[in-house]
Image (spheres, coloured by chain):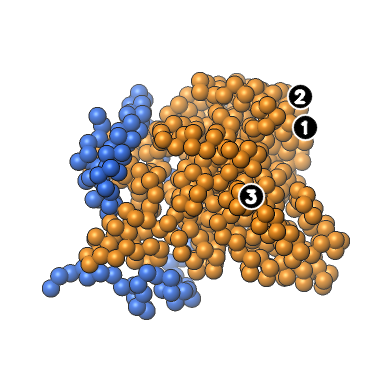
Amino acid sequence: MTKAWTIDGVKEALAAKKVSARDLAADFYKRIGERNAGLNAYLTLSEERAYAQADRVDALVAAGKPLPALAGVPVAIKDVISTRGVRTTCGSKILENYVPPYDATAVERLEAAGAVILGKTNCDEFAMGSSNENSAYGAVRNPEATDRVPGGSSGGSAAAVAACLAVASLGTDTGGSIRQPGSFCGIPAMMGSYGRVSRYGLIAFASSLDRIGPFATNTRDVAAILNVIAGRDANDSTSTSAPVPDYRAAMERPVKGMRIGIPKEYFGEGMDDGVRQKIEAGIEVFRRLGCQLHPINMPHTDYAIATYYIIATAEASSNLARYDGVRYGLRVEDDSLVAMYRKTRGAGFGAEVKRRIVLGTYVLSAGYYDAYYLKGQKVRALIAQDFRDAFSKVDVIVTPTSPVPAFKLGERTSDPLQMYLADIYTVTGSLAGVPGISVPCGRISGKLPVGLQIFGPPFGEATVLQVAQAFEQAGGGSV
Amino acid sequence: MKISREDVERVAELAYLDLNGAELEMYRKQIDEILEYIGKLNELDTSNVEPMAQVLADDQTADETLRDDAVVPCQIASDVLKHAPDPEPPYFRVPKVIER
């Protein structure tokens, strides 16, 4: 059974009784047992829960009942997303033994649709990082090149799918943490618009930026997962009640005549030549498909990283105040309450998290709020305006996902600012709240995957998926 | 220099975060470099720009997102307490706050 399963493939095999959901789960666990020690993609396996769910699916098959959208599909969940009864660490020592008492809405919806949750995937601590090297439980290796990083922060979710240790997975994206690892590992990876997927049960990093979204081996499967997890949730007041279209139906429409914006600011210095060649070849695919290519300007792009590291760290410093040794997680004892707080947080958080708490607290502190935080919010408005202006002229925007392919483990860890700059093409869409996908766009020297990013207007997920699907079908993945 | 060691100490105090001497110096240096980089935002005149306090504020459904402020029973209290570092149901216990 060691082949790349798709969601449709699983469903057909189950319906034809070629495989049971239980055997399929067991087969994936067998493969995880063989490969995970080398990749470190999974932190926790949820076998009991997975087999119970598989048995429910097999009972439906036995009874001849209709199978739900994701029946028996083995999936992995990033370890910042709460799973009832299954340890959820956020890649941090401070939550080493934390077992959530409830499910995230996205997890609940996946399971209600028949998905089998295999386990929890490794990530940068509290999703803060671009290489997965900030996990307290060790780095993840890129299955396509094991001396390299899988990207981050959702590195485990990307690696698990790329290595066929799950059919699909959930990650979270705050500044590129779904799209960039998707690009590094050579698989499609999507974040919907801000508000499209409920954040309930997503352990918060930066609440105005955090989004849950899928990884899969093909764009149709990305669409299927998004369809299940999207939609209004009373438990997240920022989730929208805008209708969720049938993405799989919408994505098959032809893209001839579609207006594609190519912003010149995303092709500047610092971009790897191999990436540039592949993206240019990818853009040619759109020309062949009959799309109209429009050079556009997004003049505030160069300010996005600076803006992002103000907003994201400010929100993080506030969100992470909850780790105080009182209600959950680690406590380092002391006779005084404040000393207990300080010691717990000093011992429980890793280096990058502390750095961001210090920076975030600083930009919010008296005397610096206007100069940094308020300034950041104003520039964020300008970046969002760049996107509105662009979408008045074009249907989607196409860019590279990352200026570089997967880099070597340890290559960038000594310089935080250089690591931050790896997110230069993804943070813009995060700040603006628009949907974006990274799709495979060839490999440098036949080895290192390159990702092409497609942004759409707010709630334009169907259009983004339509363009991604046309690109994939036209051979964009092997340019 | 944008940020001093005293600034980092003050911020760590505000954030209830124990940092040792080596960490204080490392973060001072790294955050100084990051703030230097962030300084490029001052190239932009934002005097007439409204700060973006809400993402996708033009979402037509935003007015529907407020629910009634009603108490809903929640059956997870004992589960929550079970995983607390020092529970004394129905309370979380903490070190003494007020000295007699």
Identified by mark 2, the residue type is Arg
- Identify the colour of chain B in the image: blue
Amino acid, disc 1: Ala
Residue at point 73%, 70% (across, down):
A55
Crowd tier of the residue under label 2, counting other residues whose Cα lies within 10 Å: few below 14, some 14–19, many 20 or above: few
Q: Which residue is mark 2?
A: A288
| Residue A97, above or below A150 | below
Q: Is residue A89 left or right of residue A213?
A: left
Do pointers 1 and 2 mark residues of a single chain? yes
Q: CA distance from mark 2 to mark 3?
A: 33 Å
Comparing labels 2 and 3, the label whose residue is closer to the camera: 3
Please state the horizontal and vertical placement of residue A177, each as a whole percent of the image: 53, 43
Horizontal arrangement in the rendering, residue A256 relative to residue A356 (left or right): right
The chain coloured orange carries which letter? A
| Chain letter of the residue beneath label 1 in the structure image | A
Is the C-beta separation of discs 1 and 2 under 8 Å?
yes
What residue would you read off at disc 1?
A474
State the residue at coordinates (22%, 70%).
B96
SS category of the residue bearing label 2: helix
- Image coordinates for residue A364, horizontal then vertical, percent: 30, 44
Amino acid type at mark 3: Ala
Which part of the image, by quadrant, shows the N terminus of chain A? bottom right
Q: Is residue A371 above or below residue A26?
A: above
- The mark closer to the camera, 3 or 1, is 3
